[in-house]
Image (cartoon, rainbow, N blue to C red):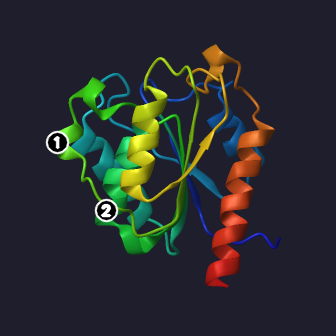
């Protein structure tokens, strides 16, 4: 697969993704990545976080690929409705439960206009499997359950995550083959 110059946006969740997190590993492994920075990593305001994602998308010349985690998934999806034509595809890992953050009403309940893959687990303390599955269906995302993987973060043993990189590369190949 040829490397494209298109940017991969890393969209972390609450408290950012630390140096050992799989998102940081992705950032260091893949070329042409950019981490979306939030004004306040402790306070997840959906509209503000989504605006930051949109700004990062708009700052790129070409459409972007998104790799989001937890609340970052909700911000990326919200931004995706506004900046849809500028997103190639999104990998949405362990999306946070919108009810838990009281943002369900602010989250558009409609299909994304770009391909996406939701990766979730059976025992994520931030979202029940059924809720992750429900939102994947609402967004029109492919859905992949990876078993008992917790929140798919450092606390559940996910630093370097080759399987996740494989999910991203598979999504990317699918989209490039389809759009090719």
Please name which of the two marks, 2 or 1, marks the residue nearer to the observer.
1
CA neighbours of label 2 inside 10 A, class few (<14), some (14 to 19), many (20+): some
Q: Is residue 37 visible?
A: no
Write down the quadrant of residue 84 in the picture.
Answer: bottom left
Taking the view exactly as shown, the residue that stands out farthest to the bottom is: 180
Q: Residue at x 44, y 33 (%)?
A: 130
Does the CB distance between marks 2 and 1 fall below 8 Å? no
123 or 155, which is in the foreground? 123
Identify the residue under disc 2: 81
Q: Earlier in the sequence, mark 2 or mark 1?
A: 2
Identify the residue under disc 1: 105
Q: How many marks?
A: 2
Q: Position of residue 10 (x, y in %)?
A: 55, 46
For the N terminus, the quadrant is: bottom right
CA neighbours of label 1 inside 10 A, class few (<14), some (14 to 19), many (20+): few
Taking the view exactly as shown, the residue that stands out farthest to the left is: 105
Q: Residue at x 66, y 28 (%)?
A: 147
Residue at disc 2, secondary structure: helix
Write down the quadrant of residue 95 in the picture.
Answer: top left
Q: Position of residue 119 (x, y in %)?
A: 58, 41
Residue 86 versus residue 78 in the image, above or below = below
Distance of mark 2 from mark 1, alpha carbons?
Answer: 15 Å
Residue 6 versus residue 131 in the image, above or below = below
Write down the quadrant of residue 48 in the picture.
Answer: top left
């Amino acid at each position: 697969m040829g490397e494209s110059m298109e940017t991969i946006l890393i969209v972390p969740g609450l408290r950012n993704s630390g140096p050992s997190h799989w998102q940081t590993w992705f950032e260091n492994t893949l070329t042409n990545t950019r981490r979306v920075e939030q004004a306040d990593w402790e306070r997840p305001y959906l509209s503000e976080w989504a605006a930051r994602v949109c700004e990062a998308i708009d700052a790129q010349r070409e459409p972007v690929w998104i790799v989001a985690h937890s609340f970052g998934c909700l911000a990326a999806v919200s931004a995706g409705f506004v900046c849809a034509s500028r997103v190639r595809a999104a990998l949405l890992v362990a999306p946070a439960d919108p009810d838990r953050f009281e943002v369900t009403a602010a989250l558009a309940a409609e299909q994304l206009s770009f391909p996406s893959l939701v990766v979730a687990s059976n025992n994520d303390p931030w979202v029940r499997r059924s809720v992750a599955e429900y939102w994947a269906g609402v967004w029109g995302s492919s859905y992949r359950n990876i078993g008992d993987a917790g929140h798919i973060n450092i606390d559940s043993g996910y630093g370097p995550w080759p399987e996740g990189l494989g999910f991203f590369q598979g999504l990317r190949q699918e989209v490039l083959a389809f759009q090719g």
